[in-house]
Image (tube, rainbow, N blue to C red):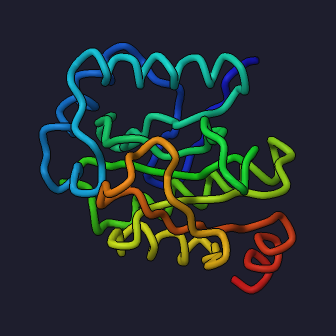
Amino acid sequence: MTPISLTTPRLLLRPWRDDDVEAFAAMFDDPAVMEFLRPADRATIEAIVGRVHAHFDRHGFGWWAAELRKTGAFIGFIGLATIPFEAHFTPAVEIGWRLASAYWGQGYATEGARASLEAAFTRLGLDDIVSITVPANARSCRVMERIGMTRDPNGDFDHPRLAEGDPLRRHLLYRINRAQWQQGMASR
């Protein structure tokens, strides 16, 4: 499939380029970025980027590289991806983001996530989008709520790729469907 890109007032969300890998890898050295994630070595980071490229090839969308339009700086990723594990709510498409901490608190995640939802429901023809995070990740929960998602407490789950006893195993599930998104757009 031909990958799509998205433009917002401040961001270009685009397929990844080879020169994005270094900036992405640097994010794994930032304790703030990694607070709710597992560490990764260089081979794992390159495998993540490889999976992102493969997802774009298969679906035409994915975790878009988030670039500041004004400067061209890679600031992380924002986008949509199919959930790669089995859970009670899969198959599903997830919306997510990971930004370098220098770009937190400036509304970039919300801006890019809104554009991603719009693409999901208008260009990609998707009906439902989910988002997941650990309970302690209040920043991501706030972004989910700002973009109109609601928590599904009955959907919370233990991440199947994390071991029992892992403090990051429990995850919250947020959802939004096309009708809810349209209603939110109409009330803006």
Residue at 29% x, 61% y is: 167
At horizontal 53% and vertical 19% (from top left) the residue drawn is 53
Residue 160 vs residue 172, the one in the foreground: 160
Furthest toward the bottom, the residue is: 187
Q: Is residue 61 left or right of residue 137?
A: right
Q: Is residue 147 visible?
A: yes
Whether residue 24 is situated above or below residue 186 in the rendered picture: above
Which corner quadrant holds the C terminus? bottom right
Q: Position of residue 12 (x, y in %)?
A: 49, 40
Residue at 45% across, 47% down: 11
Indicate the position of residue 152 as horizontal and vertical percent values.
65, 76
Which residue occupies 68% across, 67% down? 175
Count of numbered circles on the image: 0
Q: In the rendered view, does 63 fall on the left or right side of 117?
A: left
User: Is 8 situated left or right of 165 in this image?
Assistant: right
> Looking at the rendering, which quadrant does residue 178 occupy?
bottom right
**43 above or below 104?**
above
Quadrant the N terminus occupies: top right
In this rendered view, identify the residue nearer to me: 73 or 163.
Answer: 163
Q: Residue furthest front?
A: 164
Residue 80 in the image: state x and y as whole percent.
Answer: 61, 44
Q: Height in image: 170 above or below 28? A: below
